[in-house]
Image: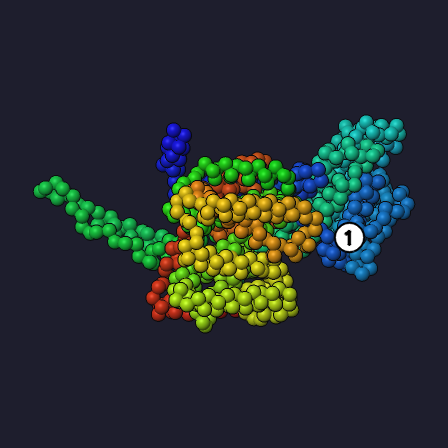
Amino acid sequence: MAATAYNLGKREINHYFSVRSAKVLALVAVLLLAACHLASRRYRGNDSCEYLLSSGRFLGEKVWQPHSCMMHKYKFSEAKNCLVDKHIAFVGDSRIRQLFYSFVKIINPQFKEEGNKHGNIPFEDKIASVKVDFLWHPEVNGSMKQCIKVWTEDSVAKPHVIVAGAATWSIKIHNGSNEALSQYKMNITSIAPLLEKLAKTSDVYWVLQDPVYEDLLSENRKMITNEKIDAYNEAAVSILNSSTRNSKSNVKMFSVSKLIAQETIMESLDGLHLPESSRETSAMILMNVYCNKILKPVDGSCCQPRPPLTLIQKLAACFFTLSIIGYLIFYVIHRNAHRKNKPCTDLESGEEKKNIINTPVSPLEILLQSFCKLGLIMAYFYMCDRANLFMKENKFYTHSTFFIPIIYILVLGVFYNENTKETKVLNREQTDEWKGWMQLVILIYHISGASTFLPVYMHIRVLVAAYLFQTGYGHFSYFWIKGDFGIHRVCQVLFRLNFLVVVLCIVMDRPYQFYYFVPLVTVWFMVIYVTLALWPQIIQKKANGNCFWHFGLLLKLAFLLLCICFLAYSQGAFEKIFSLWPLSKCFELKGNVYEWWFRWRLDRYVVFHGMLFAFIYLALQKRQVLSEGKGEPLFSNKISNFLLFISVVSFLTYSIWASSCKNKAECNELHPSVSVVQILAFILIRNIPGYARSVYSSFFAWFGKISLELFICQYHIWLAADTRGILVLIPGNPMLNIIVSTFIFVCVAHEISQITNDLAQIIIPKDNLSLLKRLACIAAFFCGLLILSSIQDKSRH
């Protein structure tokens, strides 16, 4: 009864909600969201600096999230690089002095809070030529005015950044009187034109007063109330914003510290001064406001303008535009022809006659349609991660954000289960299922920011290794059984692996190595191909006639292992090989191939393990050692139970070791040698029991079929800022945002998978002569791309 209800329920879901209808819904959602964000940008403004300076919220105890953009955490080396030959001045009271100290500590973490508290404090880094001064002016009065007036004179060198603010001393000295507030208004009115004049050549920030924690204030500060602070802030905002007629003030209000203080002031030691963590956040915001537009950090989207289009991007936009226009013309012509050939009614018999038989879709139409759809999808990619149309936020890890979604997908995976078509070890349904659930876990890992939690990181490393294990297993099995070393097979695999990445490299202006997993599987595929295709070509059919060939293949695998070991422990040789032009264009990242060496070395043995496992499994299968019938255990009961016990123990032992890791570098060093333990343990647990081998999760298998597209697409349309942040389509509601962005993301990945398959059939024909012509065209395309890339690099430098 339960099984019948399950099947009926699943059938109802599939009947009313198909993949096609889901994609239409996703398209409508994208159009509506884009329209809403465009309207919001026009109404509220498009300056993310204003959001950074005025709004935000805490994601955790110490993680500040500005509204609509991402904040970069600057290291001291980056800060020095940004502020070289710069002069920054902080003018104000003890609160501004605190902000000065926190700002200087970003540049020099060893700087100590010493010096006369009621006097000027200088700081200078002579090596970096950075000068930061604190000028003690606790009240907005003639003294502060004179200090600012000096900078307005043409003969005096002006600070590049001025941060000023004061009010609490005026409240304290004058016992919170209304006369003091009136005097404050008069004084700030006289200073406002000077600040406005300075703001034309320097960055000027007026820091609004933070709230106090009145219960902790000492007796001589009890007159400093939040009501008085609000009155002084209103006066400052009103006067400074109206200091210029008919235009927006150039003096920027630093009001975000008020929001930070509201959450943290209760941690203050005296009720007046903010705790250190809050001051550090305010200082980091100042650093982002000034440095983001100079250094352009990937994860610092606040205050960054949209990057200018490169020559290659412009050409790509023209190509996709022409493809869309071409397809629309083709569609209109085809539709008109279809109308002319519409069935007509025979006047004598009253029956319809068909003039023509429906013709199959032409390759040209498929080509134009595919590039038309791809062009629209790439426009969405660009809007999400380059055009600053949609919002971005920083990641923040908690255990619940990682483990609760894992439980959700596990329940869904169990709900959608079906019988397999075949019951062999690692059959197609099972490998698709394996890829699917691994990909979903990796996606959750990325969006939750779980890389900061070492035990989760180590287990995810095993999942990446398992993908590569399947690469070794799958391609070895194909070549060993089929013996097909033809160029068509190689081109098909390379096209399917690399098509989307090449398009993204062009559209998103990113190097090939940026999408590290695709170069990794591409290189390993070529390694497997070369290993097996080189003389002597040893395949299963040949080896069955003579056991000597098995020994020959093992020698080939041993030589491959020797080469892997040599490159793994000879970084210089590895870098020399991949630094050669044009390989360097593919594998360099930030001017060197270290990242590529690190990625390759991290899982250097697992593809070899996959090939060796495939060889042993296929040899045992050929000799009928395994029982792969439906419901049958893989071995005899005793051996099956023993191997299951060993597998469970090994699986848990690895998990315990990974969970007890304390140092990422040390664990990464051991990972290449031990990751295969958990992979093999999982394979045996999944395949030894006959009932487990006979069923699979169609839910996970569906995602497994588009796992590569999911992995690549997440970079730009699910995550943001090249995976450093999270894409925000619906602000203010994180749960709804994740649901909507995930739905669109999955639909896009599925459509790209179909486009890739359609184009592969056209661009990679089976006829060798036609294929060679296409390869010549592809080679010419990449040569042109290299030339344009070189021109771009020269223009940038």
> What percent of the width, then of the height, locates residue 519?
53, 60
Quarter of the figure with the N terminus: top left
Q: Which residue is mark 1?
A: 107
Secondary structure, mark 1, is helix
Quarter of the figure with the C terminus: bottom right
- Check the image and name the residue furthest to the bottom: 535
User: Which residue is pictured at 36% across the width and 63% down the height?
Assistant: 765
> What percent of the width, then of the height, locates residue 140?
82, 39
Q: Is residue 698 visible?
A: no
- Residue 2, picture quadrant: top left
**Which residue is more in the foreground, 78 or 51?**
78
User: Which residue is pictured at 57% across the width and 37% down the height?
Assistant: 404
> What percent of the width, then of the height, locates residue 696?
44, 43
**Which residue is more in the foreground, 278 or 416?**
416
- 601 up-or-down from 221: above or below: below
User: Which residue is pictured at 77% across the width and 32% down the height?
Assistant: 266
Q: Is residue 762 visible?
A: yes
- Check the image and name the residue furthest to the front: 638
Give the amino acid at mark 1: Ile
User: Which residue is pictured at 84% across the width and 33% down the height?
Assistant: 270
**Which residue is more in the foreground, 103 or 681?**
681
Asked if residue 104 lies left or right of residue 498, the reply is right
Label 1 environment density (alpha carbons within 10 Å; few <14, some 14–19, many ≥20)? many
> What percent of the width, then of the height, locates residue 292?
67, 52
